[in-house]
Image (cartoon, rainbow, N blue to C red):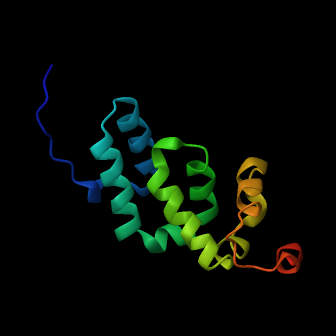
Amino acid sequence: MYTSSIELNIESVNRQEYFELIAAADELTLTELVDHIQEHIISNEKGWLLENFVQVFQKISTYEAMRKLQDYCAELICNDPSVVFTSDFGSLEEPALLALLQRDDLVMDEIDIWEW
């Protein structure tokens, strides 16, 4: 077994490929790479993450390896629910939507949710 290291320039990865790369790294049990990519997205791609929040949340909500991104997105949602409700909210699939609405730490009145 070869257990050396490789150099990966994450800056050269297309943003849409982040999740494919995480899935491949997880399948190969490259946990450090999985963590590194998630940390890169959280630290360096906040604008992209917010612009594509619903699509990102949809992809990560059922993927256990993306726990750091799930926690980060949950924190964003709880602190500012409008992140979700002002984006393409209607395209959320039922499991992700229910997980979101059932959160006890969501700082939003139920009446405001119904208005969306």
* Residue 25 location, quadrant: top left
Q: Nearer the viewer, residue 13 or 98?
A: 98
Residue occupying image coordinates x 71% and y 55%: 99
Instruction: Report whether 8 appears left or right of 106.
Output: left
Could you tell me if residue 52 is visible in this image?
no
Q: Viewer-proximal residue, 81 or 22?
A: 81
- Look at the image and tell me in which quarter the C terminus lies: bottom right
For this view, does 106 lie left or right of residue 19? right
Residue 91 % position (x, y): 75, 57
Rendering coords of residue 24 (x, y %):
39, 35
Q: Residue furthest front?
A: 104
Residue depicted at 60% across the width and 57% down the height? 57
Residue 2 in sight = yes
Left or right, residue 4 beside residue 77: left
Q: Residue sitting at 30 percent across and 37 percent down? A: 30
Q: How many marks?
A: 0
Above or below, 47 relative to 6: below
Residue drawn at x 79%, y 50% as measured from the top left: 94
Quarter of the picture containing the N terminus is top left
Residue 82 on image: x %, y % = 68, 78
Q: Does residue 31 lie above or below 80 as drawn?
A: above
Quarter of the image where one finds residue 21: top left
Which residue lies most toward the top here?
Answer: 1
